[in-house]
């Protein structure tokens, strides 16, 4: 009887601990984003607290980029690049330890095009006013980026919903097992 109660207690606690795992909710810059302004920090936001010792690395076109500081702030991991970032394709890889001890690893990619934005601002106003096609191309690129961000957000929500559904399934199974154990115990008497 004691073994049954211990087993049932463990089954009831299991869904609660599974739900406590932290996941990456958002980032600045966002996954797939084309950034047109200089980046001063890379910020990763998680769904729950993360532990000290968590870290991140970044590469630009395959070359390592140094951070002057990587700090854990409750549920955020914030990296400050050591130098101003050049235009290019970046990949940030993170290795984080959730409050519950669960390791979280992943990566995200973004592109920096801040130099092009600065060059466009330096052009004479009359040259910038001439090509209307460039503005429509920029609008189309922005809409494409918004679509990519929405798709990435939808997939993150779907994965989070999948985790929540799994928690409810496990909790439901635990309740069914508890009821079955009570019925069996009554039959033995």
Image: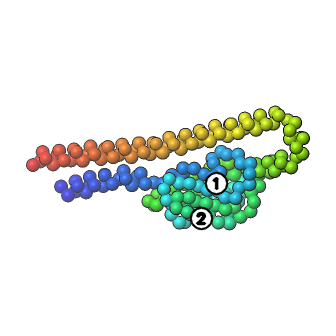
Give coordinates of residue 113: x percent, y percent.
76, 48
Q: Nearer the viewer, residue 175 or 57?
A: 175
Give the mark nearer the N terminus: 2 vs 1. 2
Q: Which residue is disc 1 drawn over?
A: 92
Instruction: Identify the residue at horizontal 68%, vertical 36% (top origin).
Output: 143
Q: Is residue 69 above or below residue 103?
A: below
Q: Is residue 167 above or below residue 96?
A: above
Give coordinates of residue 132: x percent, y percent.
82, 34
Image quadrant where residue 80 sits: bottom right
Residue 62 visible to an observer of this rendering: no
Q: Residues within 10 Å of mark 1 (few under 14, many from 20)?
A: some
Q: Nearer the viewer, residue 74 or 22?
A: 74
Image quadrant where residue 127 sits: top right
Quadrant of the rendering where the N terminus is positioned: bottom left
- Residue 38's label in the rendered image is none
Q: Nearer the viewer, mark 2 or mark 1?
A: 2
* Separation of marks 2 and 1 at Cα, in angstroms: 15 Å
Label 2 close to label 1 by CB (< 8 Å): no
Q: Secondary structure at mark 2?
A: strand
Q: Secondary structure at mark 1?
A: strand
Give coordinates of residue 99: x percent, y percent.
46, 61
| Direction left: furthest residue | 189
Give coordinates of residue 147: x percent, y percent.
64, 37
Q: Which residue is disc 2 drawn over?
A: 71
Q: Residues within 10 Å of mark 2 (few under 14, many from 20)?
A: some
Instruction: Identify the residue at horizontal 77%, vertical 34% (top origin).
Output: 136
Instruction: Identify the residue at horizontal 53%, vertical 44% (top origin).
Output: 156
Would you say 66 lies left or right of 168 here? right
């Amino acid at each position: 009887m004691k073994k049954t109660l211990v087993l049932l207690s463990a089954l009831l606690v299991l869904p609660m601990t599974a739900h406590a795992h932290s996941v990456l909710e958002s980032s600045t810059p966002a996954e797939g984003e084309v950034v047109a302004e200089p980046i001063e920090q890379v910020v990763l936001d998680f769904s729950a607290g993360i532990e000290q010792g968590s870290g991140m690395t970044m590469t630009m076109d395959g070359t390592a980029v140094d951070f002057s500081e990587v700090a854990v702030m409750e549920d955020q991991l914030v990296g400050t690049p050591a130098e101003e970032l050049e235009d290019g394709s970046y990949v940030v890889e993170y290795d984080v330890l959730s409050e519950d001890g669960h390791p979280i690893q992943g990566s995200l990619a973004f592109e920096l095009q801040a130099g092009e934005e600065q060059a466009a601002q330096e052009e004479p106003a009359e040259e910038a006013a001439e090509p209307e096609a460039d503005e429509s191309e920029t609008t189309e690129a922005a809409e494409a980026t918004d679509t990519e961000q929405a798709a990435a957000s939808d997939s993150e929500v779907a994965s989070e919903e999948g985790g929540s559904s799994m928690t409810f399934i496990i909790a439901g199974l635990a309740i069914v097992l508890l009821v079955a154990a009570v019925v069996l115990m009554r039959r033995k008497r």
